Amino acid sequence: MGSLQLDDFVAGWVGGAAAVLVGYPLDTVKTRLQAGQGYGSTFNCVLTVYRNECIAGFFKGMSFPLVSIAVYNSVVFGVFSNTQRLISQHRHENPNHPPALTDLALASMTAGAFSVAIGGPVDLVKIRLQMQTQPFLAANLHLKERTTGFSVQAVYRGPLHCVGSILREEGFAGLYRGSCAMLLRDIPGYCFYFIPYTVLCGWITPEGCLSPSPLSVWLAGGIAGAISWGTATPMDVVKSRLQADGVYLNKYKGVIDCILQSYQNEGLKVFFRGLTVNAVRGFPMSAAMFLGYELSLKALREQAQTNP
């Protein structure tokens, strides 16, 4: 019972794919607001993207995350669930013992640390593809040969071309640009993700039920996602800026430099840019993710019991 269970990884993959399909358009808006210029507000950003790039602009670069973020979430859910069982086995000699708050926190932080290994390159490519056609002031960037007015022509032809360009120009380490900021975002962020979900599921589920209902999972997952993404916004801004940096110029030397430059140029409010979008998209994305995970996990375990 204490051994590695692969069904958590499979169910996590399904949940991750569901989350990408539901939340990607708002993720594009969030990235443009945090790392781009000239949008002003969320509504204006939506209108600008639609006017300049039509509906396709909201799904720019989605093919890569649809596959890779599903794998990324597979690792996150698999590591979290197996770490939680390992802790329960060690402390209570029973992997299915209800976890304490400290157990959930430790499992969440472990999942957050593991997530960066896969999520760093995935987020980098996604953000580079999302940002390459956003409005820039050509005069500020000295890119007249690659610009037309206030728009910049696409640098990358697709995910594979983007990865190849990064490896060629920045080396392997370039794929992990912004990984320190991502660690600072994800380690506490997953605590605010899995702990509220577990607590809310236990609170919503009627006493005597063996597992939460789909409605309970959807509601608890959505609330947990809104809390997690809302609290993670300041470091998410820093991560997005570091990862977008390099499409046309290298502006930041690291996390501290990015924080200082952003504060000096735009004030404290810049670290809360995209907060509304983060919280709003966090609900449906996380609701879909947890629902896909729990339903898939239930189906896999029922199948395993039917065909031992």
Image (cartoon, rainbow, N blue to C red):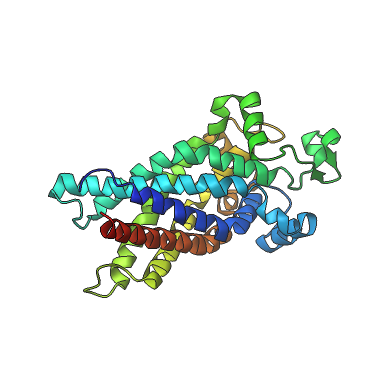
Above/below status of 245 relative to 299: above
For image coordinates 40% across by 39% down, the residue present is: 114
Q: What residue is shown at x 71% (from left), y 48% (from top)?
A: 37
> Residue lying farthest front?
307
Q: In the image, 11: left or right of 202?
A: right
Q: Is residue 67 visible?
A: yes
On-image quarter of the C terminus: bottom left
Residue 289: name its quadrant. Answer: bottom left
Q: Which of the pair 23/254 is nearer the observer?
A: 23
Image coordinates of residue 231 in percent, x first then y, are 46, 55
Residue at 81%, 40% in the rendered image = 138
Q: Position of residue 280 (x, y in %)?
A: 54, 64
Of 90 and 302, nearer the camera is: 302
Work out whether residue 65 or residue 151 is closer to the camera in this orientation and state it. Answer: 65
- Image coordinates for residue 73, horizontal then vertical, percent: 44, 49
Residue 169 is left or right of residue 272, and the answer is right
Report whether residue 108 is seen.
Answer: no
Residue 205 position by quadrant: bottom left
Q: Percent from the top left, x then y, of residue 132?
A: 71, 42
Most extreme residue toward the left, as rendered? Answer: 93
Q: Residue at x 65, y 24 (%)?
A: 168
Number of numbered discs:
0
**32 to the left or right of 14:** right
Q: Is residue 35 left or right of residue 70?
A: right
